[in-house]
Image: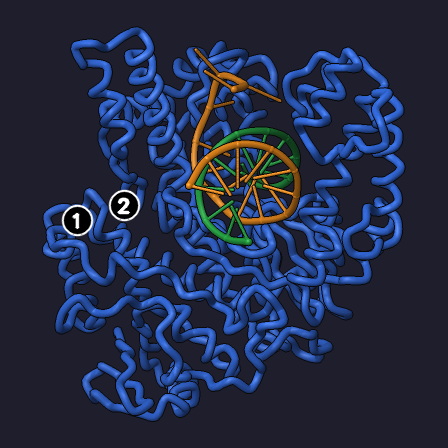
Chain colours: A blue, B green, C orange
Amino acid sequence: MHVVLTREPGGTVRLHDGTQRAVPAADLPALVADAEGGVHGGAAVPRWTWDDTNRWYPGLLRAGVRVERSHDLRLVHRILRHSTATAGSELAAAGVGAWDAMTPTPAGAAPPVGARRVPQGAALFDLAAPERSAPAPLGAGAVDPVAELRRQEDAVRGSSAPGRLRLLAAGESAGALVAAEMHHAGLPWRADVHDAILTDALGPRPPEGQRPARLEELARQIRTALDAPPSLNPDSHPDLLKAMQYAGVGTRSLRKWELEKLDHPVVAPLLEYKNLYRLLTANGWHWLDEWVTDGRFRTEYVVGGVVTGRWASTGGGALQLPKGVRRAVVADPGWCLVVADVAQLEPRVLAGMAGDEAMATAGRAGDLYAGIVASGAVPTRELAKVGMLGAMYGGTTGASAQVLPRLGREYPRAIALVEEAARTGERGGVVTTWLGRSSPAPGSAWDEAQAGAFADDAGADAAARARSATRSWGRFTRNFVVQGTAAEWALCWLASIRRRLWALGVADGARPGLAPAPFADRPHLAFFLHDEVVVHAPRELADVVAAEVRAAAEEAGRLLFGDFPVDFPLTVAAVDSYADAK
DNA sequence: GCTTTGTGCCAC
DNA sequence: AAACGTGGCACAAAGC
């Protein structure tokens, strides 16, 4: 049952649940906790329905309250608004409105810079604070959540795929809960370990504005190798390129792969310099100061932040944590990290979408690429891998393109699906994921490129531009269906993991970790990266958590593809440090 | 002075 | 344009 929550003047929250109660905002956590506890008599837990999860849930979490189900109107609106499955709905037909203009609210009460952090005791639901994300209503009732829910339900009911869209809406909303919970709990991070990694690689932390000792030494070696003056700054690309040219090192860029091809004494120190410079600037002491507080790294997950439906993140580069610093991700004392990732998620999802039994069979034994080799389609695992990646990304050169015909013969349905998605994109059309998220239509640049090719004075370059834009959009839509459906599988996986972990209950006799309530004594999700999760769990629960994470993957597969026999095997490891997982 | 663009590398 | 998709982010250079 949906219970829509709205804020009203005077610091009250109204529950649109038949009672139409209005309660002081400060009473909401207790009220929600009470409703969540009502499962005993078999009473259904409410589906808390709100404009934006991040405007409601972080406050509940800070009060130690976790909810089981929700409906995020902003996120679901965005999906339904563009889905081909709801094209005929009132919601899709309406003009651009306030729900379209809404931008996500940051989950943290705290802005990225620690100094500006809101104190812990800040009001949970501070109605005096100006709305950070909701734009001014365009007209009376423009942002009425009750009316919006009705429009969304109508759109789904009248759609060509109500079941799938309901699953997508539930998954997206559950994802928003997970994202808020992971922000709340944080990823365990040992600043001392991180500092040791940095000191080991770079030398001790230098005073502000100075190069670490190791970088200074490498800069000296670079100058020596180039016979350049001490004024040469390796951080300046133009100066460095000039110096290299002068020294007779023929290169036009400073990219790693380009430098690796050269044979010159400057190459080794320069590559090491770039490597360490990257560590320093991306995940150095400054990063540590800014992003790690009280033993936790907290990023802002942006649910549905990528067009395909993948999550994005903002703050701390959470989705690009380099392998080298993962050693600093360490479980609390007495706890462990259960790290799980899906093997070859995207080709498996493709097999499921296409109903390609041969490809599903190839994945049955575990390693899908090995299965492709076993089928005789290609001779080596490496070829199977680059071939499949090329098929899903739109590769047109090299080994990838070479093996594509053989993959097409062995797995006609899977390959046909991505080829068809590419052709649709090349025509300027829209493609849709398995559960109903549709790709954007090509933008004005695409239109102009196409129009340019037909202009009276169109030259060869205009034609080439149009062709390039055409193929590029085809690669986008080709990838969209696979990446987007993989993201949907991952949402279902996350939602299932989340529910299962909570159902495990409070760890019996486990040492409490450092995570805040409501997760202080419970296993909880701590990190998510497209096809990989990290669960922070009391050590004695490692095995049962691993089993639940595997069961969740099976469940996700069934939710998307029913009885179709495609497997989603996981690699699971219970470790102290994230770096030990693989 | 500021903002925008280009470069390059990290993750999946 | 590393002729293969999605992103974030830091820095220096270029633009205003």
Answer yes or no: are tags 1 and 2 on the same subunit.
Answer: yes
The C terminus of chain A, quarter of image: top right
From the viewer's perspective, is residue A77 above or below residue A404?
below
Q: Are marks 1 and 2 in contact (CB under 8 Å)?
A: yes
User: Which type of secondary structure does the marked residue at label 1 adopt?
Assistant: helix
Circle 2 chain:
A
Amino acid under disc 1: Thr
Residue A557 seen anywhere in this rendered image of the structure: no
Say left or right for A190 vs A518.
right
Say left or right for A84 vs A64.
left
According to the image, label 1 marks what residue?
Answer: A86
Q: Earlier in the sequence, mark 1 or mark 2?
A: 1
From the viewer's perspective, is residue A492 above or below residue A483?
below
* Residue for point 52% across, 55% down: A314
Q: Residue B8 in the image: x percent, y percent?
A: 63, 30
Question: Label 1: how many residues lie within 10 Å, few (<14), some (14-19) or many (20+)?
Answer: many
The residue lying toward the viewer, choosing from A175 and A8, is: A8
According to the image, label 2 marks what residue?
Answer: A436
Amino acid under disc 2: Gly
The N terminus of chain A, quarter of image: bottom left
What's the mark number on residue A274?
Answer: none
* Residue for point 40% across, 21% down: A411
* Residue for point 31% across, 89% down: A12
Question: Label 2: how many residues lie within 10 Å, few (<14), some (14-19) or many (20+)?
Answer: many
Q: Quadrant of residue A238?
A: top right
Residue A236 seen anywhere in this rendered image of the structure: yes
Say left or right for A75 vs A522.
left
Circle 1 chain:
A
